[in-house]
Structure formats: structure tokens, C-alpha cells
Image: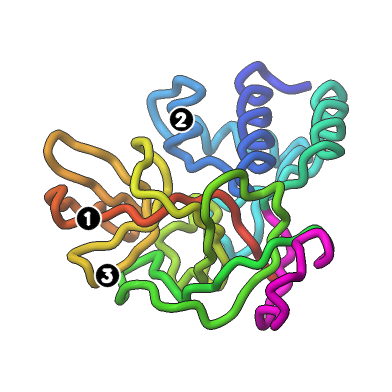
Amino acid sequence: MLTKKQYELLVLIDRRINESGVPPSFDEMKDALGLKSKSGIHRLISGLEERGFIRRLPHRARALEVLKLPENLEIKRATDASSKPANVIKGEFGAKPQSATVSPMALGSSEDLPMLGRIAAGTPIEAISDPSSYIGVPPSMLGGGEHYCLEIDGDSMIDAGIFDGDTVVIERTNRTENGAIVVALVDNEEATLKYIHQRGDKVALEPANPAYETRIFGPDRVQVQGRLVGLIRKY
């Protein structure tokens, strides 16, 4: 039997994985449960792991997988899954079809998004480039607006469940809310994937890995080029 806090944490992890394809960070778990330190989250996760509800994925810092749920949550998740696919999918990589008249429905209910190259989830690299290939993505993942894909290079977002070699699906936008994961262009030449926070008249780009430091910039040095809406991982 789960404690109240274990139950609340399990609900949070399961919901976030179903919504965005990645588990919440330890800081997000701490804030959501109203705890004062991350040590309490470590204890709750260890308790859930001992009871067989979750497991920590090997060689992936703090990446979590939900193995089972209490009966009431299992029924709800099964119902949700039948109406909305998860945002982590197995990618189908390849060249864009030559015919511009082929619809997404004709391609197994997928929409071809441009792959704009590699983006750093660590030290920023040069700005994203022109598309070199296209990836089929379910339209249900996308919503409205324009989207593109990037391949992750680095490990500074591993606590958000984003790993080196993953492909992220980005909604093209220059507006986003505090705490979102965004593609940020720094000084018009470096692009990176980070949490974004407005701190007074400064912009903070925050990693999800304690090995990396949060970088602070003036607002004129950072341009938001999109926000994370999905994740594709090849196994």
C-alpha cells in the first residue's frame, strides 16, 4: 500500500510521461509535492521502486519508467492511451518523399517534419541549419502551428529525460512561458536546448544536470526559436 506522498508522486510521474514523454525533474517533483529538499524525493522514489511501481533506467541519471499503477490509475491510463498516443514514439527516419501531394494520412498517419541538424544539450553549438532529412511524426503530437525536429548532442538535459542522440520535436515560436524547455539562440550564432526563466531584466538558460551551470544573459542576447512538444527515441 502506498503512502499519500508516494501516490501523489506516482501520479505526477505517470501524468508527465504521458503528456510530454519525459518524467519531471527532481526540482519539479519537490515543488509539486511541497517538499523542502530533493532528499525527500529520493526516499519516495526508492519506496516506489522497492514496491515495483517504477524503475530507474540503467545508465540514465534519474530517468524513470512506470511499471504498474494502483488499479484506479491503471484504468484511467488505459482509457487515456486509447484516445491519445504518448509523445515518445519510435522514429521513422529517412528522406522526404519526392511527391509533394502525398498526404500525412497516406503515410501511415504521419506528418513529415524537417530535421534541422544537431543541437547542444550542453555547451551551445552553432545555430541550427537547413533541413538535411525528414521524420514522420503523428499529427496528434503536433497540434497547431509549424514544427521541426532536432537531434540532441550532449547530456545537460538528462534529468528531464532528454538524452544524447534523442530527437526532439519543436513547435516554432518566439514566445513561451517561464520554466518551459526551449530552443534558444544565443548571440545569433549558438543554439541550445534549455529551461528558460525570466529573472528581472535577465534571461536564464537552465540545464537539467547538476554538472552544468545556469547561464544568464541580457534579453537582447537570447532569441527563443521554439519550445519542446515531443520526443522521439530510437531503440
Tell me, yes or no, if residue 203 can be seen here: yes
Q: Earlier in the sequence, mark 1 or mark 3?
A: 3
The alpha-carbon separation of the residues under discs 2 and 3 comes to: 32 Å
* Residue at x 26%, y 55% (from the top left corner): 223
In the displayed structure, 120 sits above or below 45; it is: below
* Residue at x 46%, y 34% (from the top left corner): 28
In the displayed structure, 128 sits above or below 202; it is: below
Can you identify the residue that label 1 sits on?
A: 222
Task: Verify CB contact (< 8 Å) between mark 2 and mark 3.
Answer: no
Q: Amino acid at mark 1?
A: Val
In the displayed structure, 179 sits above or below 160; it is: above
Q: Is residue 167 magenta?
A: no
Can you identify the residue that label 2 sits on?
A: 30
* Residue at x 42%, y 37% (from the top left corner): 27
Q: Amino acid at mark 2?
A: Lys
Q: Earlier in the sequence, mark 1 or mark 2?
A: 2
Residues in magenta, as a range: 88-108
Can you identify the residue that label 3 sits on?
A: 190
Q: Could you tell me residue 121's position as x and y percent? A: 40, 64
Label number found at residue 182: none
- Say which quadrant the C terminus sits in: bottom right
